[in-house]
Amino acid sequence: MITVRPLEPQEFDFFTDMHYESIHIPKGKPPKHELLNEPHLKKYHEDWGRKGDRAIVALKDDQLAGAAWYRVFDEANPGYGYVDNETPELGIAIHPNFRGMGIGRLLMKELIQQAARDGYHSLSLSVDPQNAPAVELYQKLGFIYFGISGTSWTMKHELIPKTKPTSS
């Protein structure tokens, strides 16, 4: 059985493990401590718990199996998937032992619903376009191509459709 719940403070190490897993580097990936302390990546977890930070975890038979999270960045310190100051950037990873079970889709759907409940109008993410399974999942969940940051695509999901003015 798979359950989803908020990340608990004592699970922060698992959260950083998942952050490391979320970074798509097919060959020569540096060790976790080295990679996550790079300034352009450290900002994704440093001072976790500030206003706007949200993380959920999936458990499969009571074992931590994956996590999804979002964090708001600003123009002065944008993330790779930065869209604007009001759009949180989403991250997700599934532990290698639990991939292919639908956990990623479940986490994404839950986090999208949570973002809407939190009052956000959209979510963004950054993805390596060579990571075809991830791109396909994001597209199926309603994310659309928004732009390029370095070698990664920025994708955006509108949570609350903007209404068109009615004509009289």
Image (cartoon, grey):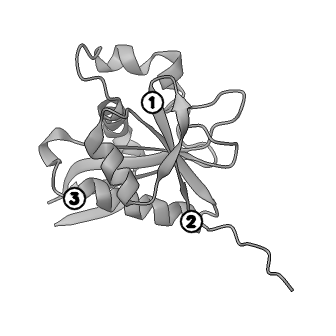
Disc 1 residue type (three-letter): Ser
Q: In which quadrant is the C terminus drawn? A: bottom right
Q: Is residue 60 visible?
A: yes
Disc 1 marks which residue? 152
Outermost residue, front direction?
168
* Residue at point 16%, 56% (across, down): 101
Disc 3 marks which residue? 102
* Residue at point 14%, 60% (across, down): 61
* Residue at point 21%, 41% (across, down): 95
> Which badge, 2 or 3, comes first in the chain's sequence?
3
Tag 2 near tag 3, CB within 8 Å: no
Disc 2 residue type (three-letter): Ala
Question: To which quarter of the image does residue 130 belong?
Answer: top left
Disc 3 residue type (three-letter): Gly
* For residue 52, side relative to residue 67 (left or right): right
Question: To which quarter of the image does residue 5 belong?
Answer: bottom left
Q: Secondary structure at mark 1?
A: strand
Q: Nearer the viewer, residue 138 or 49?
A: 138
